[in-house]
Image (cartoon, rainbow, N blue to C red):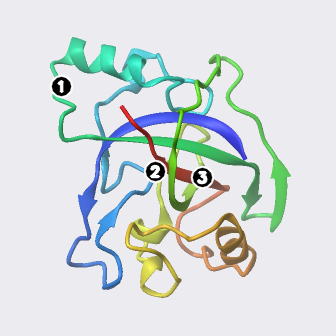
Protein backbone atom coordinates (compact mmCIF):
# COMPACT_ATOMS: atom_id res chain seq x y z
CA UNK A 1 0.00 0.00 0.00
CA UNK A 2 1.19 3.50 -0.87
CA UNK A 3 0.33 6.73 0.98
CA UNK A 4 -2.39 8.48 -1.05
CA UNK A 5 -3.43 11.47 1.07
CA UNK A 6 -6.09 13.07 3.21
CA UNK A 7 -9.66 14.25 2.84
CA UNK A 8 -12.02 15.98 5.23
CA UNK A 9 -15.50 14.49 4.78
CA UNK A 10 -18.96 14.79 6.26
CA UNK A 11 -19.72 11.13 6.91
CA UNK A 12 -23.35 10.17 6.34
CA UNK A 13 -25.42 7.74 8.35
CA UNK A 14 -26.61 4.65 6.50
CA UNK A 15 -29.47 5.74 4.23
CA UNK A 16 -32.77 3.86 4.56
CA UNK A 17 -32.51 2.47 1.02
CA UNK A 18 -29.30 0.58 1.89
CA UNK A 19 -30.60 -2.70 3.33
CA UNK A 20 -27.42 -3.56 5.22
CA UNK A 21 -28.37 -3.48 8.91
CA UNK A 22 -24.77 -4.03 10.09
CA UNK A 23 -23.81 -0.70 8.49
CA UNK A 24 -24.26 2.38 10.67
CA UNK A 25 -22.42 5.01 8.61
CA UNK A 26 -20.57 5.39 5.32
CA UNK A 27 -16.85 6.09 5.36
CA UNK A 28 -16.46 5.49 1.63
CA UNK A 29 -13.84 7.45 -0.26
CA UNK A 30 -16.32 8.51 -2.93
CA UNK A 31 -18.33 11.68 -2.49
CA UNK A 32 -21.64 10.22 -3.65
CA UNK A 33 -23.15 9.88 -0.17
CA UNK A 34 -20.54 11.03 2.36
CA UNK A 35 -19.54 14.30 0.83
CA UNK A 36 -16.10 15.92 0.79
CA UNK A 37 -15.61 19.15 2.73
CA UNK A 38 -15.71 21.28 -0.45
CA UNK A 39 -15.77 21.31 -4.22
CA UNK A 40 -11.99 21.27 -3.99
CA UNK A 41 -10.92 20.38 -7.53
CA UNK A 42 -11.34 23.98 -8.67
CA UNK A 43 -8.59 25.02 -6.24
CA UNK A 44 -6.02 22.72 -7.91
CA UNK A 45 -4.22 21.95 -4.64
CA UNK A 46 -4.82 18.20 -4.63
CA UNK A 47 -2.14 15.64 -5.31
CA UNK A 48 -1.84 13.00 -8.04
CA UNK A 49 -4.28 10.70 -6.23
CA UNK A 50 -6.86 13.52 -6.14
CA UNK A 51 -6.45 13.84 -2.37
CA UNK A 52 -4.32 16.15 -0.23
CA UNK A 53 -0.75 15.80 0.96
CA UNK A 54 -1.62 17.32 4.36
CA UNK A 55 -4.66 18.49 6.32
CA UNK A 56 -3.29 22.07 6.31
CA UNK A 57 -3.92 22.42 2.57
CA UNK A 58 -7.62 21.60 3.03
CA UNK A 59 -7.84 23.90 6.04
CA UNK A 60 -6.57 26.78 3.87
CA UNK A 61 -9.27 26.04 1.29
CA UNK A 62 -11.94 25.80 4.01
CA UNK A 63 -10.88 29.15 5.46
CA UNK A 64 -10.94 30.78 2.01
CA UNK A 65 -14.40 29.31 1.28
CA UNK A 66 -15.83 29.97 4.77
CA UNK A 67 -16.37 26.26 5.46
CA UNK A 68 -16.73 25.05 9.04
CA UNK A 69 -14.78 21.81 9.47
CA UNK A 70 -15.84 21.21 13.08
CA UNK A 71 -18.31 18.45 12.03
CA UNK A 72 -16.06 16.97 9.35
CA UNK A 73 -13.99 13.85 9.88
CA UNK A 74 -10.36 13.76 8.81
CA UNK A 75 -9.62 10.64 6.78
CA UNK A 76 -6.24 9.41 5.64
CA UNK A 77 -5.94 6.95 2.77
CA UNK A 78 -3.38 4.60 1.36
CA UNK A 79 -3.84 2.82 -1.94
CA UNK A 80 -3.09 -0.60 -3.39
CA UNK A 81 -0.49 -0.28 -6.14
CA UNK A 82 -2.58 -2.19 -8.68
CA UNK A 83 -6.01 -1.52 -10.14
CA UNK A 84 -8.42 -4.06 -11.60
CA UNK A 85 -9.34 -3.49 -15.24
CA UNK A 86 -12.91 -4.71 -15.57
CA UNK A 87 -12.65 -4.92 -19.37
CA UNK A 88 -9.68 -7.29 -19.42
CA UNK A 89 -10.20 -8.94 -16.03
CA UNK A 90 -6.57 -8.26 -15.11
CA UNK A 91 -4.74 -6.40 -12.36
CA UNK A 92 -2.26 -3.77 -13.57
CA UNK A 93 0.10 -1.25 -12.00
CA UNK A 94 -0.84 2.43 -12.06
CA UNK A 95 0.70 5.69 -10.87
CA UNK A 96 -0.64 8.96 -9.52
CA UNK A 97 -1.42 11.66 -12.08
CA UNK A 98 2.08 12.99 -12.84
CA UNK A 99 1.01 16.57 -13.53
CA UNK A 100 0.27 17.00 -9.80
CA UNK A 101 2.99 16.62 -7.22
CA UNK A 102 2.42 13.92 -4.60
CA UNK A 103 4.29 14.22 -1.31
CA UNK A 104 1.99 12.84 1.39
CA UNK A 105 2.85 13.64 5.00
CA UNK A 106 1.85 10.44 6.79
CA UNK A 107 -0.13 10.80 10.04
CA UNK A 108 1.44 9.95 13.38
CA UNK A 109 -1.08 7.36 14.52
CA UNK A 110 -3.75 6.50 11.94
CA UNK A 111 -6.49 4.06 12.96
CA UNK A 112 -7.52 1.65 10.22
CA UNK A 113 -11.29 1.66 9.67
CA UNK A 114 -11.38 -0.74 6.74
CA UNK A 115 -10.91 -0.91 2.97
CA UNK A 116 -12.99 0.60 0.20
CA UNK A 117 -13.13 -0.04 -3.53
CA UNK A 118 -13.65 2.97 -5.80
CA UNK A 119 -14.15 3.32 -9.52
CA UNK A 120 -11.83 5.42 -11.71
CA UNK A 121 -13.52 5.35 -15.11
CA UNK A 122 -12.51 8.95 -15.93
CA UNK A 123 -9.15 8.61 -14.12
CA UNK A 124 -9.76 11.89 -12.31
CA UNK A 125 -10.39 10.94 -8.70
CA UNK A 126 -12.51 8.38 -6.88
CA UNK A 127 -15.93 8.27 -8.51
CA UNK A 128 -18.23 5.70 -6.91
CA UNK A 129 -17.85 3.22 -4.08
CA UNK A 130 -20.03 0.30 -5.19
CA UNK A 131 -20.29 -1.08 -1.64
CA UNK A 132 -22.59 1.86 -0.88
CA UNK A 133 -23.45 3.46 -4.23
CA UNK A 134 -24.59 0.17 -5.76
CA UNK A 135 -25.72 -1.49 -2.51
CA UNK A 136 -23.13 -4.28 -2.65
CA UNK A 137 -22.94 -4.01 1.15
CA UNK A 138 -26.27 -5.84 1.17
CA UNK A 139 -24.58 -9.02 -0.12
CA UNK A 140 -20.89 -8.67 0.76
CA UNK A 141 -19.37 -8.82 4.27
CA UNK A 142 -18.69 -5.24 5.40
CA UNK A 143 -18.17 -3.56 8.75
CA UNK A 144 -20.23 -0.85 10.44
CA UNK A 145 -18.61 1.79 8.19
CA UNK A 146 -19.53 -0.01 4.93
CA UNK A 147 -15.92 -1.08 4.37
CA UNK A 148 -14.17 -4.40 3.93
CA UNK A 149 -12.26 -5.67 6.97
CA UNK A 150 -9.03 -6.23 5.04
CA UNK A 151 -7.20 -5.64 1.79
CA UNK A 152 -7.47 -9.36 1.12
CA UNK A 153 -11.27 -9.31 1.44
CA UNK A 154 -11.49 -6.38 -0.98
CA UNK A 155 -9.22 -8.04 -3.52
CA UNK A 156 -11.06 -11.38 -3.22
CA UNK A 157 -14.41 -9.67 -3.87
CA UNK A 158 -13.02 -7.98 -6.97
CA UNK A 159 -11.43 -11.23 -8.20
CA UNK A 160 -14.77 -13.00 -7.70
CA UNK A 161 -16.34 -10.36 -9.97
CA UNK A 162 -18.64 -9.08 -7.21
CA UNK A 163 -18.28 -5.59 -8.73
CA UNK A 164 -19.31 -6.66 -12.25
CA UNK A 165 -22.36 -4.82 -13.58
CA UNK A 166 -22.08 -1.98 -11.05
CA UNK A 167 -20.09 1.08 -12.11
CA UNK A 168 -17.47 1.03 -14.85
CA UNK A 169 -13.91 0.53 -13.62
CA UNK A 170 -11.06 0.30 -13.25
CA UNK A 171 -11.38 -0.46 -9.53
CA UNK A 172 -8.85 0.70 -6.96
CA UNK A 173 -8.58 -0.38 -3.32
CA UNK A 174 -8.05 2.21 -0.59
CA UNK A 175 -7.19 1.71 3.04
CA UNK A 176 -9.40 4.10 5.04
CA UNK A 177 -8.02 5.52 8.29
CA UNK A 178 -9.14 7.99 10.93
CA UNK A 179 -6.44 10.61 11.33
CA UNK A 180 -5.92 12.97 14.24
CA UNK A 181 -6.34 16.65 13.51
Residue, x 48% and y 34% (percent of image)?
6
Sequence-wise first label, 3 or 2 = 2
Disc ID at residue 174: 3
Q: Are marks 1 and 2 in contact (CB under 8 Å)?
A: no
Q: Is residue 106 above or below residue 109?
A: above
Per the model, the C-alpha gap separating discs 3 and 2 is 8 Å
Disc ID at residue 67: 1
Sequence-wise first label, 1 or 2 = 2
Q: Which x, y percent locates residue 181?
A: 36, 31
Residue, x 41% and y 17% (percent of image)?
57
Q: Is residue 65 above or below residue 148?
A: above
Per the model, the C-alpha gap separating discs 3 and 1 is 26 Å
Number of callouts: 3
Sequence-wise first label, 3 or 1 = 1
Q: Are marks 3 and 2 in contact (CB under 8 Å)?
A: yes
- Residue 34 shown left or right of residue 138 in the figure: left
SS at mark 3 in the image = strand
Disc ID at residue 29: 2
Q: Residues within 10 Å of mark 2 (few under 14, many from 20)?
A: many
Residue, x 59% and y 53% (percent of image)?
175
The front one of 87 and 63 is: 63
Residue, x 53% and y 39% (percent of image)?
125
The front one of 30 and 141 is: 141
SS at mark 2 in the image = loop
Amino acid sequence: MTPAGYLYKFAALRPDWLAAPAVSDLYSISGCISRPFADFIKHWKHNGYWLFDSPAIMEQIATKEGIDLSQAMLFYYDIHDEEFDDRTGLWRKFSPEPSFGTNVQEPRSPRCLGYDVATFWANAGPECSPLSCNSLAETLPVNAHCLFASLEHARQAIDALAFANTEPGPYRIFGVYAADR
